[in-house]
């Protein structure tokens, strides 16, 4: 028996056995309850997603205080607009889409473009030939990757970060960036090409 004020997911038809699917099912229930004005549901949603939102924002802002602000602002907007969720994407993707816009607003306000060092993801992003990548790794790879990333348009750089850091599918990236999936494919294609050309120029 559930105690007063507690939130559960007993109104779902069947709880999925896959942990990720089970979480999304729970989030969908919580969002419906939030749309109906259920404040305890917001508390539970915060517990489920606040760390992911914080990590998502911190990678883009490199500022813990601003990342915390994004968490608060994102959850507030989620509460305000819970009824607008149409189920076309995962709840977590929809929420991260809100976080994306909040983080971008702060970057524009500060006039900065920040992102986390790509580290091990560098080879996947640039997809260079092994010999080229080896030379890059030997020549302060991190600084070169950051310099090349800084040459990308915001949308292309963001698509790379979502794919390689958040492990999102193309459809999920499209949801976050509010664009068609084919647009995401185009952004990734051009971003990889530009990264490869930039990195190769630095090895000459």
Image (cartoon, rainbow, N blue to C red):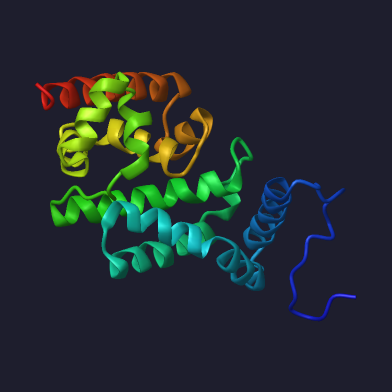
Up the image or down, 186 lies above or below 32; here it is: above
Residue 97 falls in image quadrant? top left
Q: Give me the residue at 16% from left, 43% from top.
A: 143
In the rendered view of the protein, which quadrant contains the N terminus?
bottom right
| Residue 62 located left or right of residue 23 | left
Image location (x, y in percent) of residue 28: 68, 51
Residue in the foreground of this view, choosing between 156 and 81? 156
Residue 164 falls in image quadrant? top left
Most distant residue in the left direction: 204
Q: Give me the residue at 84% from left, 57% from top.
A: 11
Up the image or down, 16 lies above or below 89; here it is: below
Q: Give me the residue at 19% from left, 47% from top.
A: 113
Residue in the foreground of this view, choosing between 175 and 197? 197
Residue in the foreground of this view, choosing between 90 and 81? 90
Image location (x, y in percent) of residue 70: 37, 62
Image location (x, y in percent) of residue 79: 53, 62
Up the image or down, 128 lies above or below 90; here it is: above
Q: Give me the residue at 82% from left, 80% from top.
A: 3
In the rendered view of the protein, which quadrant contains the C terminus?
top left
Most distant residue in the bottom direction: 4
Would residue 153 be visible to someone looking at this image? no
Would residue 162 be visible to someone looking at this image? yes
Image location (x, y in percent) of residue 160: 35, 34
Residue 71 falls in image quadrant? bottom left
């Amino acid at each position: 028996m559930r105690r007063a004020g507690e939130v559960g997911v007993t109104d779902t038809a069947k709880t999925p056995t896959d942990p990720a699917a089970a979480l999304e099912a729970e989030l969908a229930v919580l969002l419906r309850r939030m749309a109906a004005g259920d404040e305890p549901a917001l508390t539970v949603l915060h517990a489920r997603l606040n760390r992911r939102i914080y990590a998502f924002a911190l990678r883009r802002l490199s500022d813990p205080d601003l990342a915390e602000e994004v968490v608060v602002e994102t959850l507030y907007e989620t509460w305000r607009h819970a009824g607008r969720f149409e189920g076309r994407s995962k709840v977590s993707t929809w929420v991260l889409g809100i976080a994306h816009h909040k983080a971008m607003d702060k970057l524009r306000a500060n006039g900065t473009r920040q992102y986390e060092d790509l580290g091990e993801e560098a080879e996947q992003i640039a997809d260079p030939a092994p010999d080229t990548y080896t030379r890059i790794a030997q020549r302060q790879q991190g600084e070169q990757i950051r310099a090349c990333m800084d040459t990308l348009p915001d949308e292309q750089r963001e698509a790379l970060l979502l794919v390689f850091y958040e492990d999102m599918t193309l459809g999920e990236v499209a949801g976050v960036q509010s664009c068609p999936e084919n647009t995401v494919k185009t952004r990734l294609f051009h971003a990889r090409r530009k990264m490869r050309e930039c990195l190769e120029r630095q090895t000459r």
